[in-house]
Amino acid sequence: MKIECPSKGGQADICAWKQRKGQVRDFPNVGVVQCEECKLVTHAQDLSRDVNYESGSMHNWAAECGHSLPGAEADTLRRVTAIDNLAISVKADSILDFGCGSGGMLSAFATDFRVIGIEPDSGARDTATDLGHTVFESAETALVNNLKVDIVTLFHVIEHFYDATVELNRILKLLRPGGLLVIETPNSMDVLLSKYESEEFSNFTYWSHHPMLHSHKSLEQLVKRCGFEILQNSGVQRYDLNNHLYWLSKGRPGGHEVWRDFVSHGPAVAYENFLIDQEISDTLWMVARKP
C-alpha cells in the first residue's frame, strides 16, 4: 500500500482496514477500504501508476462533470471571505495557492494579496501564467526560488497526495513563522457515504485521482504530525439538501440545480448546519499554523 498512515507515518499496511461499499469510478474492479481507527478511506489496490497529474487528465474530468459541481462563484466567494478574515490575524500580504489550476483563485485573491501558484498540470499552469500569475510546477521548485509566504491554501488538493508528509514538510518551509495553512478537502464521512450509503454516489465519488479521502480525525493527525498547530477543524457543506434528495431518489448528481427550489431555504440551512455539527458534511475545512 503506497499511502501513508496519517498518525504514525510510514506505509499504511500497519493500519486495520475494512471493506467499504463502493468502487473506483474509472477502475470499477477496484474497491475501497476504510481505516477502522481514523476513518481514512483509500483504494483497495494501488493505482498510483495510472495517475498522471502533469497530463491534464484530472482537469479534463472536472470539465466533463462540470454540471454536477457546485457553482464556482459561491465557492470562490466563501473562500475569499474566509481567507480575508484569517489574513487579518496574521497580517498577511501573500498567498500561495497550491494546486491553483488555471488560476481562478489566484485572480480572486490578487486584489488584496501578492499571489503565487503551484500547479503540476502544464496546460493549466500555462493558462494561469497567461493571466499574469507566477506559478511554479512544484513546491520543491518554489523552495529553490527561496519563496516565503504568509498563507498557503490547499483547495481540494491534499486528497491527491500519495506522499502527504513530504508535501506538508515543504509547505512548512514555504511559510513564514506564524503563517497559516488552509485545507479544504472531501470528507470520507460524507453523509451520503457513511450514513445513507448511496451506492450510486459511492461509485461516482471514488476516483483514481483521489488516493485518499480524509476524515476530521485522520486529517488532524496528519497535519499535527507534520509540525503544524491546529486552529480550526470544521466542515463545509457544498451541496444542499436538494442535491442529496436527488441522489437518493434518482441516483444521479445535479439535484442542486434540477430540484433547486424543492426545499425552502430555512430547512436546507438547518440540514447543512446539522451535517457540519455531526462531522458528516461533504467537505472538511482546516486552518493550521506554523509555530
Image (spheres, helix red, strand yellow):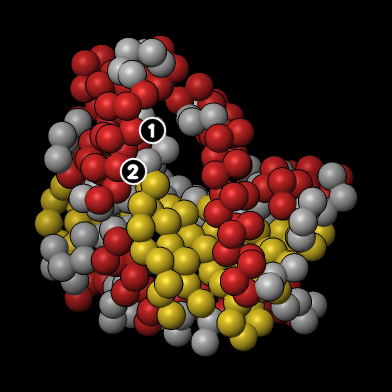
| Residue name at image x 24 percent, y 42 percent | 274
| Residue name at image x 64 percent, y 67 percent | 88
Q: In the rendered view, does 94 fall on the left or right side of 269?
A: right
Task: Indicate the position of residue 197 as horizontal and vertical percent values.
Answer: 16, 36
Q: Residues within 10 Å of mark 1 (few under 14, many from 20)?
A: some
| Residue name at image x 30 percent, y 42 percent | 273
Q: In the rendered view, does 72 fall on the left or right side of 107?
A: left
Which residue is labeled 1 in the image? 239
Which residue is labeled 2 in the image? 282
Q: In the rendered view, does 89 fall on the left or right side of 26?
A: right
Task: Indicate the position of residue 222 as horizontal and vertical percent values.
Answer: 36, 73
| Residue name at image x 13 percent, y 63 percent | 36
**Vertically, is 259 above or below 79?**
above
Q: Is residue 120 visible?
A: no
Task: Indicate the position of residue 151 as horizontal and vertical percent values.
Answer: 63, 68
**Vertically, is 34 above or below 75?**
below
Near-viewer residue (198 or 233): 233
Give the SS element for disc 1: loop
**Vertically, is 161 above or below 50?**
below
Near-viewer residue (199 or 195): 195
Q: Amino acid at mark 1?
A: Tyr
Farthest residue toward the front?
266
The quadrant in which residue 165 appears is bottom left
Q: Is residue 119 visible?
A: yes
Q: Amino acid at mark 2?
A: Asp
Task: Indicate the position of residue 150 as horizontal and vertical percent values.
Answer: 67, 73
Give the SS element for disc 2: loop
